[in-house]
Image: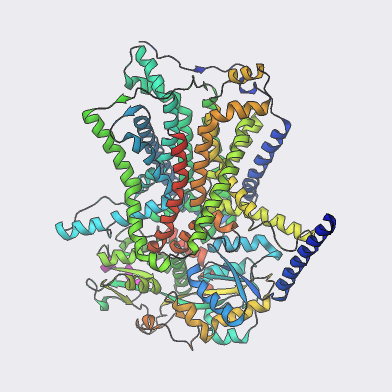
Amino acid sequence: MKQPPALAVSKPTKSGFAAGLPLPDGWICVITLITALTLIPVAVLVSSLFAPERDIWMHFVEYQLPQLLTNTFLLVLGVGLSVAVIGIALAWLTAVCDFPGRKQFSWALLLPLAIPAYVTAFVAIGLLDFTGPIQTFTREYWGPIKFPEIRSGGGVIAVMTLALYPYVYLVARNAFLTQGKHAIEVAQSLGFSPTIGFFRVALPMARPWIVGGVMLALMEVLADFGTVAAFNYDTFTTAMYKAWFSLFSLQAASQLASLLIMFVLIVVMAEQQTRTRVRYNQVGRHSVQNRIQLTGKRAWLATTFCSAILIFGFIVPVIQLLLWASEVVRQDLDERYFNFLAHSLMLGFLASLLVVMAALFLSYGVRHKTNWMLRMMVRIATIGYALPGAVLAVGIFIPVAWLDNKLVTAGWIHAPLLEGSLLVMLLAYLIRFLAVAHNPIDSQMHRITRSMDEAARSLGVTATQLIALVHVPMLRAGLITGAALVFVDVIKEMPITLMTRPFGWDTLAVRVFEMTSAGEWNRAALPAVALILAGLVPIFVLTKFRLK
Amino acid sequence: MTKKQKLLLHFSIFTATVAAITMTMVATAAEIVVYSARNEQLIKPLFDAYTKETGVSIKFVTDKEGALLQKIKAEGVNTLADVLITSDAGNLWQASNLGLLQSVQSKTLLHNIPANLRDPLGQWFGLSVRARTIVYNRNKVKRSDLSTYADLGQSKWRARLCLRTSKSVYNQSLVAMMIQEYGEPKTEKIVQSWVVNLATTPFPDDNRAMSAVAAGQCDVTIVNTYYYGALMKKVSNLPLDIFWPNQGVGESGVHVNISGAGVTRYAKNKAAAIRFIEWMSSEKAQNLFADANMEYPVNSMVQADPAVAIWGKFKKNSLNVVKAGELQAAAVKLMDRAKYQ
């Protein structure tokens, strides 16, 4: 049997990525600074390991962890598989094939990004639970029917999949757009069917992007508390909250968080190991011209599939939220909403700029310096995304307050200055969301070949010119994707925003918190709708500049 | 004027302005900073009323209890907070336990607030009372079948009970108070019997538990009264009624908890902070505090909101709510052992 060609996959030479232009010293300083900064909260959390909480651990090991770990494992497995399958399928359909509605779907399928997962969760439960309109209706007309329980493992997996598949869709689509059709053509020229071309060429080539997207989704699953709490589905994160809020031991919560950090690091490093053995280079730039035309049943199936995801992931939740919001809009909507919206947008904008810049620096650092220390540090620097926000928020706040107190003692300032400053807030977002920008940028970075650098070098360009003229245009897709993802994530973020915001600096997410913490879900719908509207801004930018 | 002189003039104007602003800030140091786990929509009207009456302005920030406590702890001696407001005695006890609050001597507070609804050390004070009681479906349950919390574990309630999750601090406090009253072994048996009787997985909030009762998924649940009040106001014709458990002779009464406040240990404006808490416990402010959330005033001189009073009078548990904090960890572990999710 013929082997499909190992397209553009070459073994790295000994010098590997380290070749290319040396980075200016200033860059190395910045990279070290960024990593050091992100390591602080991790260090705060890990330091808890030195003071064991024996009682709580014994209790957890006996009564909680077996169940929680099983639940977490099932959740990670279920969401991981389903976001991969759905994300890849949608990406392939919209990037390489053609069917009715493809153009519209290609941007619309990003919309669920704008809805926080816990909101989708609440809507899903509201609609599908025993007390919801659907079951109530069937009960009244046909008597009691046994429905599958929405508040179950399957329910959580479904909701999280609908909320998180865009991470995979976005990056996989990008990969397929630039190389998918080409891969198929090569496969076809060798006598393979498109199906085999997809599985044996296009999919393996897109692997680093897809894995990156799935990783982001899974880190968010591990960090999530709001969604699982709505389902009363206990995970490892639940244990952290229980240790902290119920058993009053932040110590034990930090210890659990440390274990999570180690686990995620091991997984990420293992994935990195398998990835670095091969290099993925982009073979020229290909726009998809001759799409695979789907006809008849297949076209109909493709349209139905895309519609279904869009309807359940976006349209239904938004309609439900609009209905709820319309009940309270008169009572609650006032001029303060301009402020909430402005604050949200401003934070999203500034944070995405900062985080993308930082991710770019890190990505370069790893590209040019392959020593394992730096790599390891970059991995740890992006761990913030896998940690429950509330736990990370404390890990950030403690050192900030410490520094404030030192400054006051030293007489430099009269009252705490750093906490509640915009600067600290943005740095906190950086620590939390670095992975979100780093993943797409770093995957894109792998596409810049050594030979490009060498060619540029032979023309006598400086490092900075090389970056500005050659790299940035090539990284553009990754940069915009990273920025857009950070933007939506920041405006949805709650615990860090709550803990580090200046007095009176409320955002839409803070509004959602105020209402949901009192169980007033309909009133939360108003800020939630505004939040979704704000989230459409980066998605619009993404569509405009990337999906042409 | 030369350029230099002009510059100098501008500079002095600027300095003078800054100085003036700083001076006014010092002069009107009548400002308190509040960290609140009680929602903005509940406290803001109260703060506005206080500012209007006294001229003292209030700066505040809201967050979850756990986060606020860590915030005050990390800020240490330089904390910005003068007052901590939070719901649930367990949280207040924990604040005091972490050394974040200070004892306050105030005759007004001792007079306005019953002894069992404030810290014996004077570190925190209840400002409103919330009762955790039984709500049932009046089409499916005879009132005479109901009696106590423990009774909900009887076999007649098999597959008829709905509960909110044990992760809710309100249930943790309820069970903590039961431990204080019955001891751990007996309480554990009661909680186990509840779990056996559950009709479905516990709910994340009181509202959903009540909706399930109204829809007939189960017949009876345990909730805080203000959630019942809010739900009945919002949805008309729900077949739900309130029942006050543990009212019999020798029984200890309905489980009550508080929303309250304390002065932080390193408050910069201690006197102003105390005055503010005193004001909140006073007759004129109590309705503003409690009625906003359909809770009961803590000050016995103040009548509850008519919409609340209509639920009837009942015997309240008179144990000091400080026990809810002291025994909270024990209660959580007990509920874990009983597999109450």
Magenta highlight on residue B152: yes
Q: Position of residue B22 (x, y in %)?
A: 73, 69
Q: Is residue A46 above or below residue A472?
A: below
The quarter of the rendered structure image containing the N terminus of chain B is bottom right
Q: Is residue B233 above or below residue A541?
A: below
Q: Residue at x 22, y 71 (%)?
A: B140
Q: Residue at x 33, y 12 (%)?
A: A191
Is A108 left or right of B288, judged from the image as shown? left
Image quadrant in which you'd find residue B112: bottom right
Q: Position of residue A79 (x, y in %)?
A: 40, 41
The quarter of the rendered structure image containing the C terminus of chain B is bottom left
Is B66 left or right of A305, judged from the image as shown? right
Q: Residue furthest left?
A: A142
The magenta stretch is B147-158
Task: Choose between B57 and A416: the one closer to the eye.
Answer: B57
Q: Residue furthest bottom?
A: B301
Question: Is residue A66 at all visible to an observer of this figure?
Answer: no
Q: Position of residue B19 (x, y in %)?
A: 76, 68
Q: Position of residue A508 (x, y in %)?
A: 48, 57
Task: Choose between A345 and B5: the one closer to the eye.
Answer: B5
Q: Residue at x 52, y 76 (%)?
A: B46
